[in-house]
Each structure stands twice: as C-alpha cells, then as structure tokens.
Image: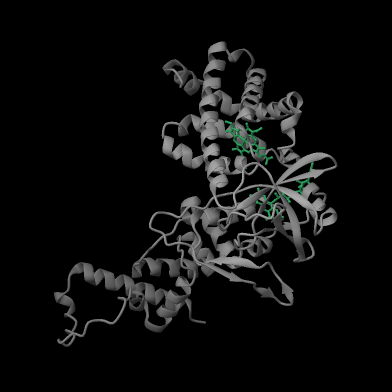
Amino acid sequence: MLTQAQEQIIETTAPVVAEHLDAITQRFYPLMFERYPEVASLFNQAHQQDGGQPRALAGAILAYVKLRQTPETARQTLETVVNKHVSLDIQPDQYPIVGECLMAAIGEVLGEAVTPDVADAWTALYNELAGLLIELEEQRYQAFADRHGGWRGTRRFRIADTRQESRVIRSFILEPEDGGAVAEHAPGQFIGVKLEIDGKPVYRHYSLSDVPNGRSYRVSIKREPGGVASGYFHDRLDVGDTVELLPPAGELTLAQGEEPLLLVNCTPKVGHHPTFGVFLMAKYDESFKLRVIQQCLREDISQGEVARQYGVDVSTIRQWLATYRQHGVSGLRKKYSHHSAAFKREVLERMWRDGLSQRQAAALFDIRERSAIGRWERQYHSGGLTALEPQRKGRRPMSKKPPSPPLPDKERSQEALLKELAYLRAENAYLKSSMP
Ligand SMILES: Cc1cc2nc3c(=O)[nH]c(=O)nc-3n(C[C@H](O)[C@H](O)[C@H](O)COP(=O)(O)OP(=O)(O)OC[C@H]3O[C@@H](n4cnc5c(N)ncnc54)[C@H](O)[C@@H]3O)c2cc1C
Ligand code: HEM
C-alpha cells in the first residue's frame, strides 16, 4: 500500500522515469543476467537484440502508474503479461530479483535524483504490481492444475509423430510421457516449451495448431534461419524424443452475450500440398483476432503461414490487419450495424472517387461484413440509390390498401425535396463518372 506522499512522488517522477526508460532497460537486463544468471535462460536472447520486448517490462510498470486507479482494468490489461509468465512458469520468488535489479538500474541511470524517498516510493509501486501479478498467476496455475489432464510446472511430452507441412514448417504431435490425459486447450492458445540444448534450458512459445482431443497437443514450427529452438526441433528432434511443456496460455474470453465458438475440424488442401489440419472458428472473438494480428506483426512469418496455423483464410487476416491499422483494437470488436442508405452511398462514392478496393473501403469505414460493399454496389447498379435503403427482413405484411401515389412536389416538405435532390445529384455524378 502506497502512502499519500509516495503516490505524490510517483506522480511527479513518472515523467522522468518515462524519459529514461530505454536507458533503464538497457542497464536492467545485463545487470540482472550478471547478478542472477539462473533467470537469464527464461529470456529469449534474440528478443534482447531488438529492444521492443525488453522495454515491455519496464513499460508495463510505468503504465501501471495510471492503470492502478482502475483495478478491474488493471487486471484485464495485465492478462497478456500473466499469459506470458504462466507459459514460462514464472514464480513468486523471482519477483524480488526483478525488483532489486530494476531499482538498481533506475538508481544508476537517474543518479542523485533517486533520493531514499523516491527509491522507497518506486519499490512500493513495484511490490504492489508484483503482488497483483503473483496473485493472478497463482490463480491460473491452480485452475489449470485442477482441470482434468492439467498439471503444474513442467510436464514431459514424447514426440508421437511429425509431419513436414511445407519446406520450412514441421508439425510435431506431443503426447504426455506419463500416458495421462491432456487438458483441452482453447482455440488460439499457445504453449510454453522448455528444451535443453547443449546443457542449457531454452524456452519458446508455440501456438497449438490442432483441435483439442484430450490425448495430445500439436505444434507447427517454422524453421528460422539461425534459430536456436526451431533449428533444434527440425534437425535434432524426432519421434520418440521428449520435450517439457508448460501450461497452455493466451486464454480466449467470449464477450458477454456472444455465442460459443463453433469448432469445425477440417483439413484444407492447397494444390497437392496438405496444409495444417486446422480448426476453424465460425466466430472469432477480439482476442483471437488480436493474437493473429500480433503474430503477423511481430513474428518473422508470412501472412500465409499465420493463416494456415490459425485456420483462417489469408484475405480475412488482411482485412483484420487493415481494420486494426485504421481503428486499433476497437475495430476488432464485434459490431452489429444497420447502415443507412446515405452511409452506403458515402462509402460507394468514396470508393469510386479514390479508386479504393472494397477491402480498403471496408477498413476505412469500419465495415465488418466483407461482402457488404460488393452487395451495395450491385444493388446500386440494379436499382439506383433507392435500392440501398435497408430492406425489411422477412415477408412484408400484405397491405390491403393500394400504395398511395406520390404527393405533388409543392405539397412535399422542404426536407424531403432536399433529400431527393441530394440523391439525384449523387446518381447523376456517378452516371457521369461511369461513362466512357
Ligand atoms: C505467443 C507465441 C506463439 C508462437 N507460435 C509459433 C508457432 O506456432 N510456430 C512458430 O514457428 N513460431 C511461433 N512463435 C515463435 C517462437 O516462439 C520462436 O520465437 C521461433 O520459433 C524462433 O525461435 P528460435 O529459437 O528458432 O529462434 P531464435 O534463436 O530466437 O532466433 C530468432 C531470429 O533471431 C536471430 N537471432 C538470434 N540471436 C540473435 C542475436 N544474438 N543477434 C541477432 N539476431 C539473432 C536468429 O538468427 C533468428 O533469425 C510464437 C511466439 C509467440 C510469442
Ligand atoms: C512487476 C513485475 C513484472 C512486470 C510488470 C513484467 C512485465 C512483463 C511484460 C509486459 C512482458 C511482455 C509480455 C508479452 O510479450 O506479451 C514480460 C515478459 C516476460 N517476463 Fe515479466 N514482468 C515482471 C516480472 C517478471 C519476473 C519476476 C520474471 C522472472 C524472472 C519475468 C520474466 C519474464 C520473461 C522471461 C518474459 C518473456 C521475455 C522474452 O520473451 O524474452 N517477469 N514481462
């Protein structure tokens, strides 16, 4: 619990810490690896080179300064960290190590600005966040251990089968060495793999690429040029060899009111090359889309390979990416919308004027139904702008009265006349622009 004085100190010093985040991060990791070499293997050394992942830890602590004001949002936001930690079996006794080295790095970088009071305030903030993460992680460890086929810590799995999916991707079917059941995973989850390569532990994550079956997991691994773990899987592991697995993570949560995901097992073929036996989800929720997008953005892996891994067609992924770039995470949320004729017209006009593809226009206007724009275009061509009016669903009730004839212009309201004028102008403009 932070005192009021400490809260004040955090507020005034947070901008200084933010300004020096990179320098603090650059000092923190070497310092921790030097003092506590036993935790170094948990961290992917390739990630240390690009800087983004290392900065995430210190960045999360800084973000917590604001997040802690809304505890429920804080818990939800920390889910990605919890997922990563759980899949690496991070333990409570490792938190003081990170805390000590982080404070030492802050002290070295900020020098005399870190008075004892400032140091105490940041230590208290770190401890509060560490306590929250430890609690959330314990809940996840326990919940998974309690499930049928679940376990805690590492569990040894034997490679029961392998399949070369493409020139660079190989799938591995992993069955528990103890012969027991395996807990079912949710679509889109990944698993932590602990290997021992040349006497040293190596941790990596792989998405589970098969439908749950209660007996085994499947991972599909792309060979990275110079990659330690993927190279080991491809060149040195075969049927009968064993690896250790950590609990699956990356839980998918269904938004309130959303229907359960429908799993359909299928093995699509592309030409003569069998691709991954994948599972399709009839409905994709926000976190699944986000995971697919993150994979496309962060991994050195083509969109086609991500599409095969997750069982989503590549054009759907491209649309998610375009929408994500335009509207961020909120663009990935489910949206039920009934578009007015005016909106549809605006979309079509913008698309024609700027020469946009349907996908680009859909992303720009945040239209989730991919086929909608093509349908609107066809409706427009067949019936003009009035055909864009939303159609009532189902059979229209029979009307006994014949339709009333349109009112003469002088009896119609100015608003109705202006509306029709706008329609006619737009129609005229489109007809002109489509003439050879
Ligand atoms: C949630 C999640 C799910 C994932 N799912 C999958 C999946 O389903 N399938 C899959 O194939 N991968 C997946 N990955 C990626 C996977 O975890 C590994 O990152 C990937 O296999 C590469 O690991 P590696 O040990 O082979 O390569 P690394 O040894 O980590 O190297 C990666 C690249 O960095 C270069 N490199 C290494 N060290 C250095 C250095 N010191 N300096 C400069 N460059 C260096 C290497 O040459 C290589 O090109 C997933 C990752 C995450 C986070
Ligand atoms: C309050 C303390 C901590 C915070 C705020 C924190 C935050 C983070 C964040 C934001 C990530 C990136 C998540 C992602 O990639 O999606 C991460 C990853 C990671 N964390 Fe933590 N963490 C903390 C403590 C710890 C501790 C105690 C350990 C154990 C030594 C640890 C080990 C790791 C490892 C190994 C990774 C993955 C790194 C990689 O991929 O190279 N973290 N953490």
Q: Nearer the viewer, residue 260 or 71?
A: 260
| Residue that appears at 26% across and 81% down | 396
**In the depicted structure, whether residue 409 falls above or below residue 243:** below
Count of all numbered marks drawn on residues in the image? 0
Q: Position of residue 435 (x, y in %)?
A: 48, 81
274 lies left or right of 225: left
Q: Is residue 232 left or right of residue 138?
A: right
Q: Residue at x 85, y 42 (%)?
A: 198
User: Residue 188: x, y in percent?
Assistant: 58, 56
Query: From where the camera sits, is residue 184 visible?
Result: yes
Residue at 79 percent across and 65 percent down: it is 167
Give percent across and percent down for residue 353. 49, 68
Q: Nearer the viewer, residue 402 or 219?
A: 219
Horizontal and vertical percent for residue 91? 62, 33
| 386 left or right, relative to 131 | left
**Is 148 situated above or below 100?**
below
- Colour treatment of the image: one colour
Q: Is residue 355 visible?
A: no
